[in-house]
Image (cartoon, rainbow, N blue to C red):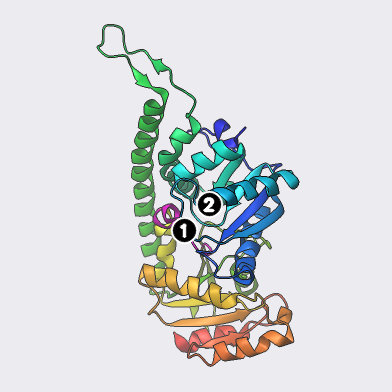
Amino acid sequence: MAFSEHADIRKPQDIFKRVTALLVVTSDQAPSRTAAQRHRDELESLCLTLGIRSAAWDFFNIRSFNSATYIGSGQVQRLACIADENQCNLIVFNNSISPRIQRNLETILDIAVVDRQEIILQIFADRATTREARLQVELAQLQYSLPRLKRKWADLSQQRGGVKGAKGSGEKQLELDKRTAQERIVRLKKEIAQIGKSRDVQRRNRTSGNVRNVAIVGYTNSGKSTLLNRISDANVLSENKLFATLDPTTRRVRLPGGETVLFTDTVGFVSDLPHELVDAFRSTLEEAVLADLLLIVLDASRDDFLMCWETTKSVLEDLGAFEKPRLVLLNKMDLVPEEAMFAINSFTLSGERCIKVSVKEDSSMENVLSTIESML
């Protein structure tokens, strides 16, 4: 039975607990199995954040796109065999798949099928703590779920009767749920807009004394919250998990020369972030747009740190913030293997202003703060 049959758009259920997943990476995302391995590693980390155990993964070479099942019919059968051999009750595609493909695969395989977007949305739903974050996540989930309601109600054909005396035979449950979702989306957008106005007032109050702002940005789990804790004793949640921080946190920090500057920890970036979340969290990411300086934190210990850099750069360009003064912190240098140092050193020569650090291990952030002071 597909987990989606129990989902409720009005009260999202956690459908991912206590499941074993088969991860799928396709050739339209990765040209080789080696490249696919990197995508698989991040997808596995996303799943682990939700408590999903991945029992197996496979790479599918797409020769021609199948509009009904995405992969070929023979590959679908191979997928079924792998899932059966590993006793998987969930299949997770690393790329986005359409509602139609999702429904078709669930019908053929009799296993719940989700994509990377749905995993990320559920992580955000689990991690949201403030009212604004919860509303933004609910909005993103509704926008994602709306075209997929047919998947939930595929076997429901009965109609509800109309009001006594009214013409017509009433509305299908699917139509009622669509209307409920659309009305809720309108209300959520109004509430989020109102909160955004309050955020603008708070931001203006913070900057009314000409106090400058530094936005800490970067790929998720790169060490942004740990950095803010080190320089300000902020006590921000800092975990070795993806998306540990969803709500921006701002703290005052005194620079070596005596000036007080505001540092804001922002939500982490990730490749292929669901566009529903980009839209919903635009007010949160505005901290980067309005900052005087960007402090970009990169996890140098990752073998795909250049991909993290490109993702961060792309998101900042989309926000119109990449041209701001910026300083790149190559973090976790204590974990970088010797064979990876050539790539690190090459990056430092690329023209970006960089500092190599290990936020957890370094006894002082004096060099970082002094550099920020001189740039400001």
Instruction: Tell me which residue sits at (43%, 66%) in the image.
Output: 287
Instruction: Tell me which residue sits at (44%, 42%) in the image.
Output: 100
The reply, left or right, for residue 267 in relation to residue 292 is: right
- Graded by Cα atoms within 10 Å as few (under 14), some (14 to 19) or many (20 or more), the crowding at tag 2 reads some
- Graded by Cα atoms within 10 Å as few (under 14), some (14 to 19) or many (20 or more), the crowding at tag 1 reads few
Query: SS class of the residue under badge 2?
Result: loop
Q: Is residue 232 above or below residue 126?
A: below
Magenta stretch, overall SS = loop
Among the 4 quarters of the image, the one containing residue 168: top left
> Count of labels shown?
2
Which residue is most to the top?
165
Q: Residue 64 — which label? A: 1
Q: Earlier along the polypeptide chain: callout 2 or callout 1?
A: 1
The image position of residue 144, as x and y in percent, is 44, 45
Q: Which region of the structure is painted magenta?
A: 267-279
Do the CB atoms of the residues marked 2 and 1 lie less than 8 Å apart? yes
The image position of residue 78, as x and y in percent, is 64, 50
Q: Nearer the viewer, residue 355 or 115?
A: 115
The reply, left or right, for residue 59 in relation to residue 257 is: right
Dot 2 corresponds to which residue?
Answer: 72
- Quadrant in which the C terminus appears: bottom left
Q: Nearer the viewer, residue 351 or 226?
A: 351
The image position of residue 186, as x and y in percent, is 33, 40
